[in-house]
Image (cartoon, rainbow, N blue to C red):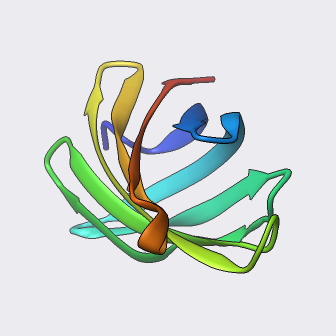
Amino acid sequence: MAVDGKWEIVINSPLGAQKATLDIATDGAVLTGTQQAAQGSGPLENGKVDGYALSWSAKISSPMPLTLDFTGTVDGDKLSGSVKAGSFGSFPFSGNRV
């Protein structure tokens, strides 16, 4: 599948650029994997894929416990989209396959 693999992304948040590594796999319309970042690491939740569009949630523990909701699109070896951080709003993210 076009989205399977390891990705390095950067979230452009009000606290500055936040880096994360994704390791994702697809099975039909289901997206699974893990996200590792300084703010917290763990499994992806509610992962979905539809062609080159994908969405998932990831929990962080720093600076406070929060669930991040991602929506994005894959274009070759590039991934971009937005992440909603609860009541803090949405921020853009982008990254590349590694």
Name the quadrant containing residue 50.
Answer: bottom left
Tally the numbered discs. Answer: 0
Q: Please tell me whether residue 42 is drawn above or below residue 94 in the rendered image.
A: below
**Image quarter of the C terminus:** top right
Residue 2, position as x, y percentages in the image: 31, 36
Q: Please tell me whether residue 75 is drawn above or below residue 70 in the rendered image.
A: above
Residue sitting at x 59%, y 31%? 10
> Is residue 49 found left or right of 14 in the rendered image?
left
Residue 81, position as x, y percentages in the image: 32, 39
> Is residue 70 found left or right of 75 in the rendered image?
right
> Is residue 53 found left or right of 69 in the rendered image?
left
Name the quadrant containing residue 69.
Answer: bottom left
**Image quarter of the N terminus:** top left
Q: Please tell me whether residue 11 is drawn above or below residue 58 in the rendered image.
A: above
60 vs 22, nearest the viewer: 60
Residue 35, position as x, y percentages in the image: 66, 57
Residue sitting at x 46%, y 73%? 86
Residue sitting at x 78%, y 51%? 37
Name the quadrant containing residue 70.
Answer: bottom left
Residue sitting at x 23%, y 67%? 28
53 vs 63, nearest the viewer: 63
